[in-house]
Amino acid sequence: FDGKFDPNLQYRETLGMGTEVVVEFRDGEVMSGQTTQTYGRQQPRFNVIPLDTTSNNISVLVERDAIKGIYSKEEYEKRENQQLENYVQSHLADGHSREELIADYYFEKHSYARALKHFTTALQATPDSLRLRKKVVSTHYNVGMRHIKNHEFNRAMSCMKRILEIDPENPRAKRKYNKIKEHVKRMHAAAHEKANNK
């Protein structure tokens, strides 16, 4: 609960016994999980156990006022597929490939890992595209920032390193890479000192 989630430890203590749901929050976050008891649509609040085993959350108390929508897995997938298709069809005139448009859609939804997958595929098809290179760099940066937020510093460094492979003079990635590197170094030094003092 100090915000320093260790993926090597097993934190989960309870299992959801209710309904599998997808919760879309007003701030754009989407969480798939299982309610701890049978879910009633009139309840002002309910608990959800995230299905993502790497999540930093054991259980989330969801306030109805904070959510934009709640769906079954099937409802959400159908809705997402329809929204994606509508987005692609409405942007085809821009002259971008379908793969790039799918990536743009996920980027706008802040689903950076999914966006990166599609941007990378689009870039492989047109490796000389400066526009796509910029989009890949920007997406890597956002993925890296998510890793920093989750205290996954080695993964964050890998993202910044990948940016510098694509754009060696990128000032933001250089600064962030050096800052993370120093932070990790201080963490290791503190851990080493603590171990020696025992």
Image (spheres, rainbow, N blue to C red):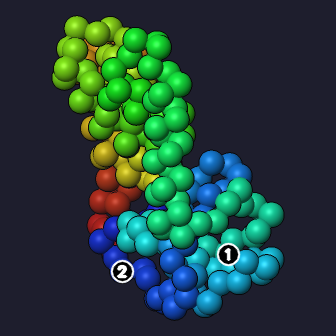
Q: Is residue 37 above or below residue 51?
A: below
Q: Residue 168, position in %: x, y?
A: 27, 14
Q: Residue 101, position in %: x, y?
A: 41, 27
Image quadrant assignment for residue 118: top left
Q: Is residue 125 above or below residue 110?
A: above
Name the residue rendered at 48%, 40% in the picture.
84
Q: Residue 12, position in %: x, y?
A: 44, 82
Image quadrant assignment for residue 123: top left
Q: Which mark is residue 150?
A: none
- Name the residue that disc number 1 marks: 61
N-terminal-most mark, 2 or 1:
2
Nearer-the-camera pick, 110 or 151? 110
Quadrant of the frame with the C terminus = bottom left
Name the residue rendered at 52%, 32% in the picture.
87
Name the residue rendered at 44%, 20% in the picture.
92
- Name the residue that disc number 2 marks: 10
Q: Is residue 95 above or below residue 75?
A: above
Give the Cα distance between marks 2 and 1: 20 Å
Nearer-the-camera pick, 21 or 163? 21
Q: Is residue 72 above or below residue 153?
A: below
Name the residue rendered at 36%, 80% in the picture.
10
Circle 2: element type = loop
**Is residue 111 shown to the viewer in this render?**
yes
Give neighbour class at mark 1: few <14, some 14-19, many 20+ (Cα, 10 Å).
Answer: few
Q: Amino acid at mark 2?
A: Gln
Give the number of the mark in front: 2 or 1.
1
Q: Amino acid at mark 1?
A: Leu
**Side of 160 where 27 appears, left or right:** right
